[in-house]
Image (spheres, coloured by chain):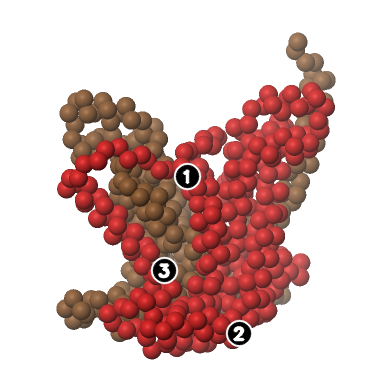
Chain colours: A brown, B red
């Protein structure tokens, strides 16, 4: 029986009513605390507002000013550098461990727990420990390096040319577990018969890795690269505690700059423009990755 | 990306026993990485029980000369650490309860009720998940200050409650529950809310567990939120409280370590208790 138009529109009305009553609490919050702020900061990025008084629209001035802002340029470059250091290394190590763990090793659960442990602990506590571990004159790392006969070990967090690398090391250490789990899940979904067929063809381990494992893992690799890039741009807690953006401006990154501009200097309009540039950068990189996806990602 | 498949817990079987060079290499890599992961924690724990002068001794002494339990007493008495604990617990628990109710209701509408704007609305929800927090941070703050909620825990609780991620998680999970089950209940005269409450929710324990863990951990470990919203010391969360030992008690590293250990113990316990849920959650929500 085909329902008549009248019955159909009645069902639609009824479902709409039920649907929205389920959604109601969430949709109010979503509109008020997510969608409205996203739009409001876009509008604010064209103003010179500082939170008080009249709102002056200044067109694209904020964005033009960003082009001449050395501080912003440094943060921008640092954010890109941080991504270029941390994302490939994190993904490489995570794949390595996931592949190793997936090959019938004993005590898998123990190792998995160990690798995932940093990810569940608060970055603040983690940063506090690493600050001491990196201590240039007394810390255990340089202590060991000196013992090994390296006479001038790096100053790590206190050395402008090493600080960003040091923060990356802590960041990588903290996030490897997360990506490892994603890769393990990906590896588990590769059907065994592919490897069995390769065995019959007499394929070696290396060849199996490059011709089966890697191509089958490519969708996960693609996804983790996207997430990894986005996450690397959002690193704030570690920078705040480990270096405070220093020494000099060597670890000043975009989100740190946005926080300072908004909540230390109260330049809401300018900070909003910075936030939108950050958003744009993330968006463009993600789009480029999606475009490049066809070349290397298996469906 | 519209189905969440149950992924098994990742404990691959031991297939064969044969000691080869490759195998030793594998173990070497894994043991090395695992040690790198765990040693900072051991170092932190050991430093938290040492006398100040002993912390940086070399070669590293993993077991303190004499255990300085006093460090922990000092942490809990020089600053109101117990209060920070309660504050953090309060925010984490209330946020978690609200986010589960709120997200499961919305997820139900998106998965199980057919109305015309449904998919478009859901798309907008998902799209905002890609937007970095910094983009909403400033207007959210201004809104909260208009509502008089700055310097109160409620700002953090409210913001934590509206998470598109939770909605996404529940919607994906609900899709895997067959419609026939709901249809049968409708015929039996159960109301839509009754179906949600008595049939769908009890079937969704894995999704609830995942969101509970994620949301609890997130609220517990959050730093930027409390940093923006909380100014009075009596409202501080643990993550802000630790700051006291970084900035003011600059030289007392043993206290800092004791504070850090105190702050991470609950999350580590939660992790060990709910490890499989946690790992399944990461795998299920990460892979589309």
**Chain letter for mark 2:** B
Rounded to the nearest angstrom, the CA distance separating label 2 from label 3 is 24 Å
| Residue A153 appears in the picture as rendered | yes
Q: Which residue appears at 20% of the width and 79% of the height?
A: A147
Chain of the residue that carries numbered disc 1 in the rendered image: B
Chain letter of mark 3 equals B
Residue A177 placed where, x, y %?
41, 55
Q: Name the front one of labels 1 and 2.
A: 2
Closer to the chain start, of discs 1 and 2, is 2
Q: Sequence-wise, which precedes: disc 3 or disc 1?
A: 3
Name the residue at 38% across, 67% down.
Answer: A170
Read off the residue under disc 2: B77
Give the distance between the C-alpha atoms of the residues marked 3 and 1, in whole angstroms: 25 Å
Per the image, label 1 sits on a secondary structure element best described as helix
- Give x and y (percent) for residue A234: 48, 61
Q: What residue is at 44 percent from the left and 73 percent from the top?
A: B45
- Please tell me which residue lies in front, B288 or A190: A190
Residue at the disc numbered 3: B41
Q: Is residue A40 among the parts visible in the rendering? A: no
How far is the residue under mark 1 from the one under mark 2?
41 Å
Q: Is residue A43 left or right of residue A82?
A: right
Q: List the residue tagged with mark 1.
A: B283
Q: Classify 10 Å Cα crowding around label 2: few (below 14), some (14-19), many (20 and above).
A: few
> Could you say which quadrant of the image residue A185 lies in?
top left
Is B41 rendered above or below residue B279? below
Q: Residues within 10 Å of mark 1 (few under 14, many from 20)?
A: many
Tell me the SS state at disc 2.
Answer: helix
Where does residue B49 sit, x and y in percent of width and height?
45, 80
Q: Are marks 3 and 1 in contact (CB under 8 Å)?
A: no
């Amino acid at each position: 029986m085909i329902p008549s138009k009248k019955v159909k529109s009645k069902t639609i009305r009824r479902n709409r009513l039920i649907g929205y009553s389920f959604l109601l609490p969430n949709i109010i919050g979503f509109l008020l605390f997510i969608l409205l702020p996203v739009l409001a900061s876009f509008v604010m990025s064209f103003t010179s507002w500082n939170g008080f008084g009249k709102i002056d629209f200044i067109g694209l001035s904020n964005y033009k000013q960003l082009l001449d802002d050395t501080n912003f340029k440094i943060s921008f470059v640092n954010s890109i550098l941080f991504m270029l250091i941390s994302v490939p290394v994190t993904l490489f190590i995570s794949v390595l461990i996931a592949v190793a763990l997936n090959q019938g090793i004993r005590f898998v659960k123990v190792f998995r727990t160990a690798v995932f442990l940093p990810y569940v602990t608060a970055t603040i506590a983690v940063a506090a420990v690493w600050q001491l571990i990196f201590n240039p004159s007394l810390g255990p790392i340089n202590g060991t390096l000196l013992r090994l006969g390296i006479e001038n070990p790096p100053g790590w967090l206190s050395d402008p040319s090493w600080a960003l690398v040091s923060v990356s090391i802590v960041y990588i250490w903290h996030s490897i577990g997360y990506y490892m789990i994603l890769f393990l899940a990906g590896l588990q979904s590769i059907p065994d018969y592919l490897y069995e067929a390769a065995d019959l063809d007499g394929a070696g381990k290396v060849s199996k890795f490059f011709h089966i494992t890697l191509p089958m893992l490519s969708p996960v690799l693609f996804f983790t690269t996207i997430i990894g890039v986005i996450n690397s741009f959002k690193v704030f807690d570690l920078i705040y505690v480990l270096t405070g953006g220093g020494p000099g401006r060597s670890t000043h990154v975009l989100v740190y700059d946005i926080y300072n501009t908004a909540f230390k200097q109260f330049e809401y309009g300018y900070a909003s423009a910075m936030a939108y540039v950050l958003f744009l950068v993330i968006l463009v990189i993600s789009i480029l990755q999606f475009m490049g996806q066809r070349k290397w990602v298996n469906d | 990306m519209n189905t969440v498949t149950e992924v098994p817990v990742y404990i691959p079987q031991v297939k064969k026993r044969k000691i080869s060079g490759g195998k030793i290499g594998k173990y070497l890599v894994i043991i090395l990485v695992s040690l790198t992961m765990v040693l900072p924690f051991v170092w932190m724990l050991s430093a938290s029980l040492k006398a100040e002068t002993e912390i940086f001794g070399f070669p590293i002494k993993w077991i303190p000369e004499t255990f300085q339990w006093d460090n922990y007493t000092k942490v809990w008495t020089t600053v109101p650490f117990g209060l920070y604990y309660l504050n953090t617990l309060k925010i984490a628990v209330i946020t978690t309860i609200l986010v589960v109710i709120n997200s499961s209701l919305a997820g139900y509408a998106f998965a199980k009720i057919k109305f015309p704007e449904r998919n478009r609305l859901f798309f907008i929800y998902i799209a905002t998940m890609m937007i970095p927090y910094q983009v909403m941070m400033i207007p959210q703050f201004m809104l909260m200050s208009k509502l008089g909620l700055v310097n109160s825990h409620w700002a953090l609780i409210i913001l934590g409650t509206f998470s598109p991620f939770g909605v996404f998680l529940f919607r994906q999970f609900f899709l895997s529950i067959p419609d026939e089950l709901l249809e049968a209940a409708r015929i039996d005269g159960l109301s839509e809310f009754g179906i949600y409450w008595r049939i769908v929710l009890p079937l969704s324990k894995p999704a609830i567990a995942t969101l509970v863990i994620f949301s609890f951990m997130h609220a517990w470990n959050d730093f930027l939120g409390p940093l923006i919203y909380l100014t009075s010391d009596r409202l501080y969360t643990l993550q802000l409280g630790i700051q006291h030992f970084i900035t003011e008690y600059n030289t007392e590293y043993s206290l800092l370590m004791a504070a850090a250990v105190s702050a991470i113990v609950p999350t580590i316990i939660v992790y060990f208790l709910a490890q499989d849920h946690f790992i399944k959650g990461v795998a299920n929500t990460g892979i589309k």
